[in-house]
Image (cartoon, rainbow, N blue to C red):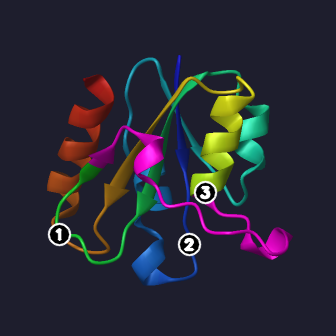
């Protein structure tokens, strides 16, 4: 089973597409989980995860395979805890082996975006 953790805010149109598509994409052997916090990483048994989220400023689906490409911000308090830092920590402690971040545009042809997401997952 492949796990796709879908993030976003369903109350903000510009940040809701990942969760919306989580309900629409049906793939055998793929479990789409709508997430509101990073706790989903702790609950997942899959060591090779996919993350689906809206990325501001892009016009097509992108796939980030190397979490070392993510900039980890300096932490001053727990409110500064970001995804890049969290993924690197999870990899270091052996909770995950790989993470593919599927970034999707805020707007565009929804069917094309779905096709591109499916291609990334099936690779």
Q: Look at mark 1 in the image and give the residue it sits on.
A: 59
SS at mark 1 in the image? loop
Please give the label number shown on residue 83: 3
Near-viewer residue (67 or 118): 67
Q: Nearer the viewer, mark 3 or mark 2?
A: 3
- Sequence-first tag of 1 and 2: 2
123 or 20: nearer the viewer = 123
Q: Is residue 59 left or right of residue 66?
A: left
* In front of the other: 3 or 71: 71
Element at badge 3?
helix
Name the residue rendered at 63%, 31% in the picture: 91
The CA span between labels 3 and 2 is 19 Å
Position of 46 relative to 65 (above/below) = above
Residue extent of the magenta highlight = 63-83
- Which badge, 1 or 3, is on the more N-terminal residue? 1
Q: Residues within 10 Å of mark 3 (few under 14, many from 20)?
A: some
Considering only order in the chain, which callout, 2 or 3, is on the residue closer to the N terminus? 2
Number of marks in the rendered image? 3
Q: Residues within 10 Å of mark 2 (few under 14, many from 20)?
A: some
Q: Position of residue 53 (x, y in %)?
A: 45, 58
Q: Are marks 1 and 2 in contact (CB under 8 Å)?
A: no
| Residue found 31% across the figure and 60% down from its top | 104
Which residue does the image show at 61% across and 21% down from the upper left?
47
Residue 67 place in picture, x, y as percent: 47, 43
Is 40 displayed left or right of 110 in the figure?
A: right
Nearest to viewer (mark 1 / mark 3): 3
Residue behind mark 2: 10
Q: Is residue 90 magenta?
A: no
Asked if the magenta segment contains residue 74, the reply would be: yes
């Amino acid at each position: 089973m492949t796990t796709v953790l879908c993030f976003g805010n369903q109350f903000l149109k510009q940040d809701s597409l990942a969760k919306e598509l989580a309900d629409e994409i049906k793939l055998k052997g793929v479990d789409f989980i709508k997430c509101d916090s990073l706790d989903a990483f702790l609950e997942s048994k899959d060591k090779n995860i996919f993350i689906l989220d809206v990325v501001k400023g892009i016009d097509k689906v992108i796939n980030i395979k190397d979490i070392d490409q993510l900039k980890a911000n300096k932490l001053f308090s727990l409110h500064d805890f970001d995804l890049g830092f969290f993924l690197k920590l999870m990899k270091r402690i052996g909770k995950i082996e790989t993470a593919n971040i599927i970034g999707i545009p805020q707007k565009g042809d929804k069917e094309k975006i779905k096709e591109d997401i499916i291609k990334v997952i099936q690779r």
